[in-house]
Amino acid sequence: MAERDNQGRKTKKSSIKDKAEGTFHEVKGRLKESAGKLSHNKNLKAEGTIEKVAGKAQKKIGKVKKVLGK
């Protein structure tokens, strides 16, 4: 059953949203990491690594919420 916001509109379950956003950040982080390697930019590479790890963590949070039914 779909969740509804305070105006009665259907919303995505937070677990699905977390997994989708986590995947987005993970891919974005990989791209930044690769761009940093290619351009020899240590800061961009580090930023990409951090974003990739944060995306993985967000995906895990989404999986836990799914198990808990949120």
Image (tube, rainbow, N blue to C red):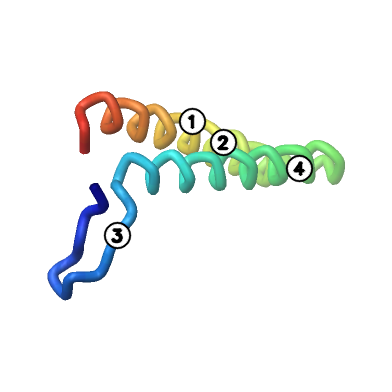
Asked if labels 3 and 2 touch by Cβ distance under 8 angstroms, the answer is: no
Mark 1, residue position:
56
Asked if labels 3 and 4 touch by Cβ distance under 8 angstroms, the answer is: no
Q: Choose the circle earlier in sequence order: 3 or 1.
A: 3
Could you tell me which secondary element the residue under label 4 belongs to?
A: helix
Q: Choose the circle earlier in sequence order: 2 or 4.
A: 4
**Mark number for residue 52?**
2
Q: Residue furthest front?
A: 1
Q: Please state which of the two labelled residues, at mark 4 or mark 3, is closer to the viewer.
A: 3
Q: Is residue 1 left or right of residue 57?
A: left
Q: Please state which of the two labelled residues, at mark 4 or mark 1, is closer to the viewer.
A: 1
Task: Please give the name of the residue rendered at 56% of the width and 47% of the height, measured from the top-left corner.
Answer: 24
Task: Please give the name of the residue rendered at 20% of the width and 27% of the height, measured from the top-left corner.
Answer: 68
Q: Dot 2: within a 10 Å radius of its alpha carbon, few (fewer than 14), some, or many (20 or more) residues?
A: many
The residue lying toward the viewer, choosing from 49 and 25, is 25
Mark 4, residue position:
36
Amino acid type of disc 2? Lys
Distance CA(mark 2)–CA(mark 4): 13 Å
Distance CA(mark 4)–CA(mark 3): 37 Å
Distance CA(mark 2)–CA(mark 3): 26 Å
Residue 50, horizontal then vertical, whole percent = 53, 36
Distance CA(mark 3)–CA(mark 1): 23 Å
Q: Please state which of the two labelled residues, at mark 2 or mark 1, is closer to the viewer.
A: 1
Q: Is residue 15 left or right of residue 33?
A: left
Amino acid type of disc 1? Lys
Amino acid type of disc 4? Gly
Q: Is residue 60 left or right of residue 49?
A: left
Distance CA(mark 4)–CA(mark 1): 20 Å
Where is the C terminus found, in terms of image quarters?
Answer: top left
Task: Please give the name of the residue rendered at 24% of the width and 47% of the height, measured from the top-left corner.
Answer: 1
